[in-house]
Image: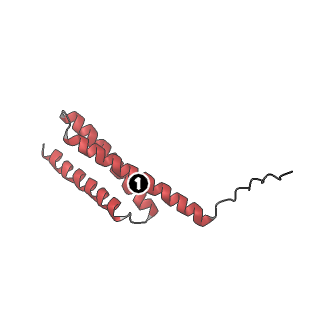
Amino acid sequence: MTKLPTPEAKQPLNTADQDTATQAGIEKTLFDEIAKGLKYAAKSLGAIDEQEQLTLIAEAENAYQNAVYLVEQTATVPEPPLAQKLHQLGVFLERNDTLQEGN
């Protein structure tokens, strides 16, 4: 009679593995927030009217603030491509605020 292999019990994650998993989750969320902000920023450029544009810019601003919060909480600088996209979104929002104040 052949003995069936017994399933191995899952070992709990050690602290380093937990930290790595947490960091990966934060980086994924950061990436998602930046992508969302850039999507809303791009859509705002083709908005039909001012109200739609303001709504889309507000969504982009919200995503930007979420991304900045994540960066501050982790106290680590995002990888260069991600940092550049975050910077681009911030510059877009800054310029847009200036344009809105002039109206």
Pointer 1 residue: 30
How many badges with numbers are in the image? 1
Direction right: furthest residue: 1
Residue occupying the point 39% across, 53% down: 31
Quadrant of residue 72 within the rendered picture: bottom left
Front residue (pair 27, 60): 27
For disc 1, the neighbor class at 10 Å (few under 14, some 14 to 19, many from 20) is many
User: Hey, what amino acid is under mark 1?
Assistant: Leu
Front residue (pair 83, 68): 83
Query: Which percent across, then down, holds residue 102?
Result: 12, 46
Direction left: furthest residue: 102
Front residue (pair 56, 27): 27
Residue occupying the point 22% across, 34% down: 51
Whether residue 54 is situated above or below residue 75 in the rendered picture: above
Query: Which percent across, then down, holds residue 18?
Result: 58, 61
Residue occupying the point 23% across, 56% down: 91
Query: What kind of element bears circle 1?
Result: helix
Residue occupying the point 26% across, 56% down: 88
Left or right, 20 with reference to 76: right
